[in-house]
Structures are given as structure tokens and as C-alpha cells.
Image (spheres, rainbow, N blue to C red):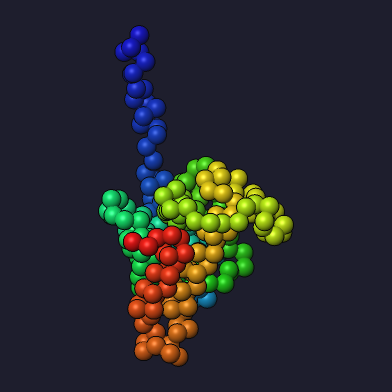
Amino acid sequence: MLGAMTTVNPVSAERSQPTRRERAHAAAQAEILQAARRLLIEGGAERVTVRGIATEVGITAPGLYRYFSGREALLGELCSSLYDELADVLYEARDRDPDAPLKQRFLVTSFAFRKWALEHRPEFGLLFGAPIPGVLVDIHIDPDPAANRGMRFGQVWLELFAELWRQHPVPVPDADELDPRLREQLTEYHEQIGRIVPLGAVVLYLSCWIQLYGAVATEAFGHLNFALHDGDAEALFHDLMGELAAKLGLTH
């Protein structure tokens, strides 16, 4: 009986492997996305066109539709792959030394986000700039992380914040003290994340994200060049993150 339970059907196992055609299709999609990223870096999202990508990879424009339904779908997949890349960078930074003080892990992760943004400004602009009409990247909670790669980026910060909250809870308003409009909007998200922190702490989490994103985006988009040589805001960013860490109750 045990042998029967553990026997693997070789036919089923063989069918679980991608076919040659499926591997070729996946390789072609990867090549197309690489070409799209090159065009993005060279000239921004406007440069990423079906015709331009087709020329890059050596196929006809109609031939590209065998791999993506259109420009919007292609850009959406490019966004998802970039979120994956960025999430990998942040997870590696955050978990490099799991025994390090929480303040250090928070700062290391924040600086990794800034570094990626400054080294990949066109890609950062695609992900965090003005949304492109028709390009949808779902970053809401999904039970299957593989089905929602954009959410992996948010999960890095959410998990870190939950850990911060467990170890260093700070005063936050009770749910009934929040503006009713804000409370109503956040209730669904609060449910999605499993109520891992109080509703008032979700407001703190969003406030911290706005400050972190604002600091990174202002520098990455060149909006500090008027005051700082070459727009280099590393020292200022360090001070801002120190203030944010104190706001989270991280004093050492």
C-alpha cells in the first residue's frame, strides 16, 4: 500500500514539464521584455511601442501579438517583472542580517530602495510615476504571490512594519477616532492584510510610506537639483530616514 501511494506516474511527471514549444514561447516573451526595457531606458515609456520592440527583436509587428495582446499588456508584464526585481533587492537587504537591530534593518531596506531608484530611474518612473492609461498592475493582496508579483514589493514593507509594530508599538488613534471617510476606505485593506496591526497603525504605515516614497521620488525625478549639487541627497535622506525611524519608535 505504501509503495502504491508513493509511486509517481512517469507519464504525469513528464507532462508537468513545459514542452519545447512552451519553452520557446517563454524565451521569446523574455527577449521581448528585455527589448522593451532597453527602449524604456533609452527614451522613456513613449519609446516602448509595438513596432519599435518588433524591430529590436527582429520580427514583424503583427508577429509580436502572438506573445502579447498589445502594448498595454506588454507594459503591464514589464511592470510586474520590475516589481519582482525590486522586491528581490529589498528582501535581500532586509533579511541579510535577521539578527540586526530593527532600526538598522529598516534603514538598510530604505537605502536599498533609494539605490535601486537612482540606478534605474526610467524603470522607477514607469513603476512609480504617473500611471499609463490602459496599463494595469494589480498590487492588492492576493492569496497566491505568484499571481500578484506587484504585491511582493508592498509585502516587503508590510512585513517589516508588522515586525516593528510587534516590538515597538507606538500610540495611534483608535478606529472610532479616525475620520469616517478614512476609516471606511481603509477597512477593506485592513481586512485584506489580516488585521495584523490595529486600524490606526495602518494610517501610520501609509504615512510612513508617503514620506519614504516622497523622499526617494523627489530625488530620483531630479526635483532637488535646484538646491543640491547633482541632486545628491544621500545625507538628507539619511536624516529623513532617522526621523522616520524615530516616528516608528526606533531609537537605537
Identify which residue is drawn at 33% across, 18% down.
Answer: 7
- Can you say whether 93 is above or below 10 in the image? below
Identify which residue is drawn at 39% across, 88% down.
Answer: 228
Residue 148 picture location, percent across and down: 50, 50
Identify which residue is drawn at 40% across, 34% down.
Answer: 16
Numbered circles on residues, count? 0
Determine if residue 206 is in view. yes
Residue 215 picture location, percent across and down: 46, 74
Looking at the picture, tell me which residue is in the foreground, 180 or 137: 180
Looking at the picture, tell me which residue is in the foreground, 81 or 28: 81
- Can you say whether 247 is above or below 42 in the image? above
Q: Quadrant of residue 94?
A: bottom left
Identify which residue is drawn at 62% across, 52% down.
Answer: 174
What is the quadrant of the N terminus in the image? top left
Determine if residue 59 is in view. no
Residue 210 picture location, percent across and down: 53, 67
Give the left or right position of residue 173, taking residue 56 as reference.
Answer: right
Farthest residue, direction top: 1
Residue 33 picture location, percent across and down: 43, 62
What is the quadrant of the C terminus in the image? bottom left
Looking at the picture, tell me which residue is in the foreground, 164 or 62: 164
